[in-house]
Image: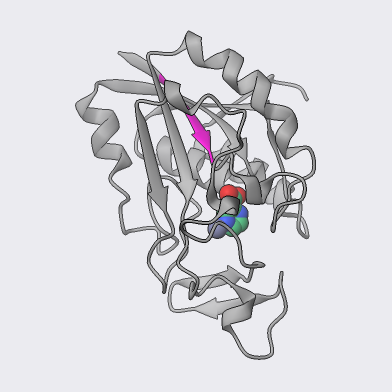
Amino acid sequence: MAHALIVIDLQNDFCPNGALAVAGGDDIVAPINALMGQFDAVILTQDWHPANHASFASNHTNAAAFDVTQMPYGPQVLWPDHCVQGTKGADFHADLHTDRADMIIRKGYRPQIDSYSAFFENDRTTPTGLEGYLRTRSITTLTLVGLALDYCVAFSAVDAARLGFDVRVRRDACRMIDLDGSMAQALAAMTQAGVRLEPAHG
Ligand code: VGL
Ligand code: ZN
């Protein structure tokens, strides 16, 4: 019975001055570093898109960033180009203690499908392989932190709970994008899936 810390997408493009900046994204780096020593395993996720990724508004005609489009797998927000493989924006925040990570899992590398969740791509069925990694290491409990609370953190938390993991989200160590009710929807989905939000009130 091991407990892992999963740090979601703490990358330059989601921090202030990044291509898809999340307000206060860099405020959580030091608190997350401080948490790492309390867990049996530390896992980092890395959003890792090719330049021709279908989630980028720039790859669609007559589309603007934050529009919603219909993909074969359902609705998809179109984002500004971000976390392009091999760019500075895709690197982890320079102060994040990446040396402490046992495992780094990349996602969103297939041109035609986005992957918010660390477990399944946005068709909700193509696995990333993280579940197998956790199970073979006897990890049963997960604490999630990182960016963004209303997208990649929430999708990862819901999928993990559905897979039967005991899932907690430290929302003081997360920051949100906050598009049109995205936070309310994410909180409802996490609560319904049985994710424990910590601190309970906040
Ligand atoms: C994310 C939008 C697009 C995230 C990633 O990490 O929450 N959001 N790609
Ligand atoms: Zn992305």
Vertical order, 69 against 121 (above or below): below
Residue 107 image offset from top left, x and y in percent: 41, 53
Q: Nearer the viewer, residue 10 or 173?
A: 10
Residue at 59% across, 43% down = 11
On-image quarter of the C terminus: top right
* Render colour scheme: one colour
Out of 23 and 156, give the one closest to the viewer.
23
Q: Position of residue 165 (x, y in %)?
A: 38, 29
Based on the picture, tell me whether residue 40 belongs to the magenta stretch.
no
Q: Residue at x 30, y 52 (%)?
A: 127
Q: Is residue 87 visible?
A: yes
> Is residue 6 within the magenta segment?
yes
On the image, the x and y values in percent for residue 75 come to 56, 72
Q: Is residue 160 above or below residue 38?
A: below
Quadrant hosting residue 65: bottom right
Horizontally, residue 43 falls left or right of residue 87, namely left
Main secondary structure type of the part rendered in magenta: strand
Q: Residue furthest bottom?
A: 61
Quadrant of the snapshot with the N terminus: top left
Magenta span of residues: 4-8
In the displayed structure, does residue 201 sit left or right of residue 8? Answer: right
Taking the image as drawn, is residue 151 in sight? no
Q: Position of residue 71 (x, y in %)?
A: 49, 77
| Vertical relation: 95 (above or below) 132 | above
Q: Quadrant of residue 95?
A: top right
Question: At x 54% / y 51%, what residue is drawn?
Answer: 90
Q: Residue at x 43, y 21 (%)?
A: 100
| Residue 195 vertical placement versus 139 (above, below) | below
